[in-house]
Image (cartoon, grey):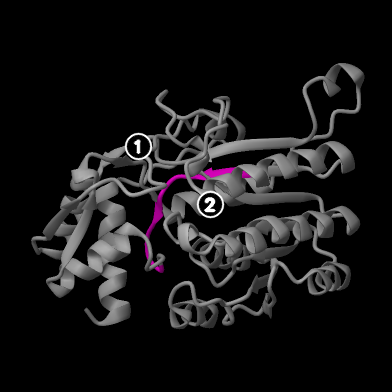
């Protein structure tokens, strides 16, 4: 099949595009290669992807309406996996317009491209951040998510509502995936696993927020990609019969997480074990936009696809640290 994978130079986008190419699909990767984090890392990922004969790259900004219209019109994608976004919670406090441009305007352009060009299924990245400070755990897609605590989370929730609307109005099958703290080789430098590993290997202190009283449902990248690949092959049907129509439009949401939250200090301990080094911890207060815990209920994903993330934390961290040392010569 012919896929568009947005954010192909990003962490999850790179792994997803690579997996699709290995399966023999034709993949067009889109990215604007912005400098939110290391462009060199993004280019290194693209260098790997360009080794696949079925991969081609387009440098384009999601907010470029004319460019996006031309891309969809010329390429006629069968399926779209939309993973590009302006990421980061704390960055949104200083750069709110970047989130409006990429996550709102950009998403409208993706939806319009799907609408006018017969895309069979749109799979897009949401985030566990939409659950905000919900106290009921584990987090279920049936839970109310009306109280985001960061602009990033608000844009992701807006994406879910926009996708639902397009599914209702234009019969576009859409599936949103709420990712839970994804980590692994080729990971993002702005995320805790990367920052902790870098600092520990360099003998630098690491910042532990809320005095370590936080937990995350750390999810290994291979499990996330497996979930994406399986769910893209399961587009929700449009209910044509009146009785079915009461079930709503072809818009679905799934959590992708390990389903086993880990305290932040325990995660640091896994990195220490993998590196053979002790960390220097600096305990700091809670940061604006952060949440206390994330914990995924993945029963719906398992029921729909027969798959549930399963990579143990110790194994996943070991793979990441090995990649980091190899890639950076650390």
Q: Earlier in the sequence, mark 2 or mark 1?
A: 2
Q: Secondary structure at mark 2?
A: helix
Q: How many marks?
A: 2
Residue 153 counted in the magenta span: no
Residue 271: image x %, image y %?
Answer: 20, 58
Label number found at residue 15: none
Of residues 318 and 164, which is closer to you in this image?
A: 164
Residue 286: image x %, image y %?
Answer: 29, 45
**Residue underneath mark 2:** 152
Q: CA distance from mark 2 to mark 1?
A: 17 Å
Residue 146: image x %, image y %?
Answer: 57, 31
Q: Secondary structure at mark 1?
A: loop
Q: At x 58% / y 37%, what residue is drawn?
A: 254
Visible residue check, residue 25? yes
Would residue 249 appear left or right of 118 to someone viewing this image? left
- Mark 1 neighbour class, 10 Å CA radius: few under 14, some 14 to 19, many 20 or more: many
Q: At x 47% / y 81%, what residue is drawn?
A: 44
Magenta-tinted stretch: 176-186
Q: At x 24% / y 44%, what residue is drawn?
A: 210
Label number found at residue 293: 1
Of residues 123 and 128, which is closer to you in this image?
A: 128
Q: At x 66% / y 42%, what residue is drawn?
A: 160
């Amino acid at each position: 099949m012919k896929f568009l994978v947005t954010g192909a130079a990003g962490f999850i986008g790179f792994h997803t595009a690579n997996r699709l190419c290995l399966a023999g699909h034709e993949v067009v990767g889109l990215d604007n290669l912005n400098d939110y984090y290391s462009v060199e890392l993004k280019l290194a990922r693209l260098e790997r992807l360009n080794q696949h004969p079925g991969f081609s790259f387009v440098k384009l900004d999601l907010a470029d309406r004319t460019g996006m219209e031309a891309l969809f019109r010329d390429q006629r994608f069968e399926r779209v996996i939309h993973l590009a976004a302006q990421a980061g919670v704390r960055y949104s406090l200083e750069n709110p317009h970047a989130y409006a441009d990429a996550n709102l305007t950009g998403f409208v352009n993706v939806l319009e491209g799907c609408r006018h060009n017969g895309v069979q299924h749109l799979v897009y990245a949401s985030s566990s951040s939409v659950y905000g400070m919900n106290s009921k755990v584990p987090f279920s897609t049936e839970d109310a998510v009306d109280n985001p605590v960061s602009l990033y989370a608000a844009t992701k929730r807006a994406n879910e509502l926009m996708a639902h609307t397009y599914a209702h109005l234009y019969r576009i099958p859409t599936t949103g995936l709420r990712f839970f703290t994804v980590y692994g080789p080729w990971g993002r430098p702005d995320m805790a696993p990367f920052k902790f590993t870098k600092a520990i290997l360099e003998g630098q202190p690491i910042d532990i927020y809320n005095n370590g009283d936080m937990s995350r449902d750390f999810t290994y990248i291979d499990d996330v990609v497996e979930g994406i690949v399986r769910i893209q092959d399961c587009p929700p049907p449009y209910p044509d019969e009146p009785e079915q129509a009461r079930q709503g439009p072809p818009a679905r949401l799934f959590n992708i997480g390990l389903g086993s939250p880990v305290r932040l200090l325990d995660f640091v301990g896994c990195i220490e074990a993998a590196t053979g080094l002790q960390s220097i911890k600096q305990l700091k207060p809670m940061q604006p936009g952060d949440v206390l815990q994330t914990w995924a209920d993945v029963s719906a994903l398992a029921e729909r696809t027969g798959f549930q993330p399963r990579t143990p934390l110790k194994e996943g961290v070991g793979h990441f640290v090995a990649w980091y040392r190899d890639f950076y010569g650390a």
